[in-house]
Image: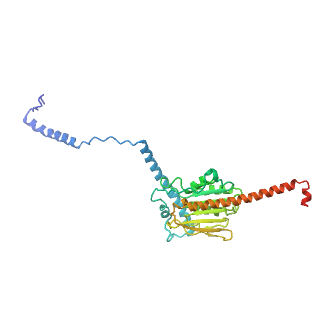
Amino acid sequence: MKTGTGVRHYKSHSDYLQNRGKQASELISKELGEKLAPASKPDKVQLSDAAKEKKAEIKDHIKENGKEIKRASKHLLADAAQVAKGAVNLPGIGSALDIVSAIIPDNKIVQEVKEVVSPREEVGVADGARVIFVSGLHLAGISSDDEGLQRMAKDLEGAEHYTWKDEDEIISKVRSTPKEEPVILVGHSLGGDAIVNIANKLNTFSNGFRKIDLLVTLDSVGFDNDIIPKNVKKNINYIGNKDVLFNDGPNIARDNIKTEVINNLRKENHRQIDDSQEVRETIYNEVSEIMKSRSELQEQEDLMKSFISKIMSHPNALSILK
């Protein structure tokens, strides 16, 4: 038993010996328990709403980029398989995944360039023509949302912007375009590969051997885009001089009489070539020249129709024709 003074009394000596071990065990357990007891946990850090949004955005970027790279890899592997005709290895080229991986920029800096075209309300050169800009692989959070071709499409009244994955939709758009209206396709990277594929598909019986007035390829990425089909009137091909893995060399015409091919070696790297002021100016001038010719032809047709209409409305029209 234990008195109010804290002195413990035992019935006998044997009772003391029996309880002494129990006391020691309780004391040791108590002290060790206090030493081994976990320290109080710090308050959990609460992320701000902005931090949570950024974390979710980064997670989405990683997920989206992975899908883009995987899809681009499949596209290039299919391209390579078609060209290789069943060959297992492609010496000197490497895997499609190696090429696509190299597309990821080593930094997020986007070079600022001066605008070449006039303000949108003053351009209007795409009126009466199908002008389509086709971008290549886009990596969310790394490449710019306002990249070169997309800006040109915005600045050119009536122009349209698609990505390399939209081949079927572009073909449908071209097929719905009246035959007398010019068709102009401009593509960068995988977009350059896509527009050559589109040109080949349009050059078929089922698609009416549709003519393409201008094909502009900017540092195309792929394995079967260097032969330009004869339904293309003119191809301007830009090749980056710094990123040799991105392009597959100069283009050639399948029919030199029907197709003019111009190859240009550029100092810009793969990501900068579509932002080059000189390149953009050339594209603008080529489109303007086609539209000017189209306008002059339309004017001649209208004058001829007007002339015929006036003759037919003359009282002696039948006698004049005889």
Report the colour scheme. Answer: rainbow
Point out the image quarter for the N terminus: top left
For residue 129, what is the image quadrant? Answer: bottom right
The residue at the point 63 percent across, 61 percent down is 285
| Along the line of sight, the residue nearer the viewer: 53 or 33 | 53
Query: Picture quarter containing residue 173?
Result: bottom right
- How many numbered tags mark residues here? 0
Q: Position of residue 312 (x, y in %)?
A: 87, 55
Left or right placement of residue 81 versus residue 182 in this view: left
Q: Residue at x 14, y 38 (%)?
A: 23
Compared across the picture, whether 17 is left or right of 219 comes to left
Residue reaching furthest to the top: 4
Question: Which x, y percent locates residue 122?
Answer: 64, 52
Q: Report if residue 179 is visible in the image.
A: no
Quadrant containing the C terminus is bottom right
User: Is residue 94 placed above or below 149 in the rendered structure?
Assistant: below
- Judge by depth and name the residue closer to the eye, 167 or 77: 167
Report the residue that reaches farthest toward the left: 13
| Camera-side residue of 284 and 236 | 284
Which one is nearer the viewer's eye here, 312 or 64? 312
Residue 103, percent across and down?
49, 61
